[in-house]
Amino acid sequence: MAAPTDEHLVSEGEMAKLIPTLPLETRYPRFPLRRLSGFWLPEFVLPGVAAAHARFDPRPDDVVLASFPKSGTTWLKALAFATMHRDRHPAAGHPLRRGSPHECVKFLEVSFALAGNKEDDDVFASLPSPRVLATHLPYHLLPDRVGRVVYVCRDPKDAFVSGWLFTHKAMADKQVAPPPHTLEEAFELFCEGRCMCGPQWRHVLGYWEASRRWPEDTNTNKVLFLRYEEMLLDPAGNVRRLAEFLGHPFSREEEAAGTVDAVVDLCSIHSLKKATANVGGATTTELGVRHGSFFRKGKAGGWRDHLTPEMAARLDAVVAQALHGSGLTFGAVACKDDSAS
Ligand code: PAP
């Protein structure tokens, strides 16, 4: 695997000059992509990467939720926000019943990108601690010293299919014509890693390796590595892991009072789909997409309805080859870390 370069460690002014020189990919819907430091990132986000590096002032109690797109971001945002702020917000009238998880937890690089040059400051400075933030950036493009990171990964076939269907919904939300690409064309690009934040497997690997360095290496970020498929199988167990990692484990009293199940229920796809903010036409200010478009089936293995067995085998082979020797694998439903067994 090619080592990441240091292209990303440029100032905001240098980034503006660098962007037009970076390799461009316009065939993958929905945004033009530029390859920065080995990853295909939306062009509009790149100024936000430089701005986040220059201006974001991390705090020790921050938590950054990281993911490759369509891998469980919305769910993780809801779960982490509800877990972290459970003392502050009783279940009734909870912000997650009134607003989208994407309003409760903002993307770091997108927020800086949208703030533009008008804002010289850290756009998150006024957010009270402990802050919960999110990112789709690969691990090595995170700002320094972000501290605690929770990563969620998902079978790439499901992430691809979810992204493909979402793209059509998002373009309809924005009343933009659907992409001219066929699913097969987009799939080929995904297999080449030429998709938003791709290659998917390299994105996952960066965080997985970081999660294995911690806790031995105390100079590194603390990374909790979660899997969407395992969260579906055992949501309560994963919420407990999350709470412990966040330094706010559920007390015996909370366990007895059913607080873990309450968090799971509040953040289930069924509850969130019904929440007022997610049924109307409201859009996320950041992304211009209807809140409801982030919820579909929320299952593992749904790729079978959209990909042929040959397509699945092709992507599985690409991923297996790229991850060979790393110890990281994806399974269809139950993913496992085969180096741990
Ligand atoms: P993002 O990266 O654009 O924020 P993300 O939330 O990661 O998207 O992915 C959306 C997927 O998560 C959808 O999967 P599907 O298309 O296969 O159905 C969506 O349904 C699923 N999802 C959203 N919220 C939840 C939830 N609360 N529980 C389980 N799955 C969820």
Image (cartoon, helix red, strand yellow):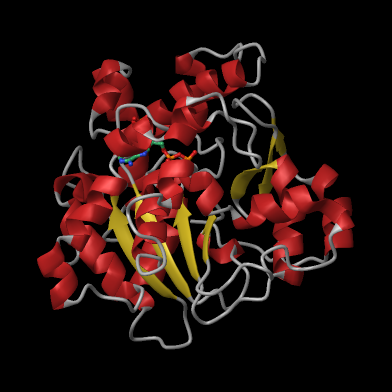
Question: 133 or 220, which is in the foreground?
Answer: 133
Quarter of the image where the C terminus is located? bottom left
Q: Residue at x 75, y 70 (%)?
A: 55
User: From the viewer's perspective, is 110 left or right of 98?
Assistant: right
70 shown above or below 142: above
All told, the count of numbered labels is: 0
Q: Residue at x 35, y 65 (%)?
A: 86
Q: Residue at x 46, y 16 (%)?
A: 183
226 shown above or below 269: below
Locate residue 152, reporting x and y percent: 36, 53
Locate residue 158, reporting x and y percent: 33, 32
User: From the viewer's perspective, is 117 left or right of 159?
Assistant: right
User: From the viewer's perspective, is 257 left or right of 64?
Assistant: left
Say which quarter of the image contains residue 174.
top right
Question: 193 or 277, which is in the foreground?
Answer: 277
169 shown above or below 82: above
Say whether residue 83 is visible.
yes
Question: 315 or 220, which is in the foreground?
Answer: 220
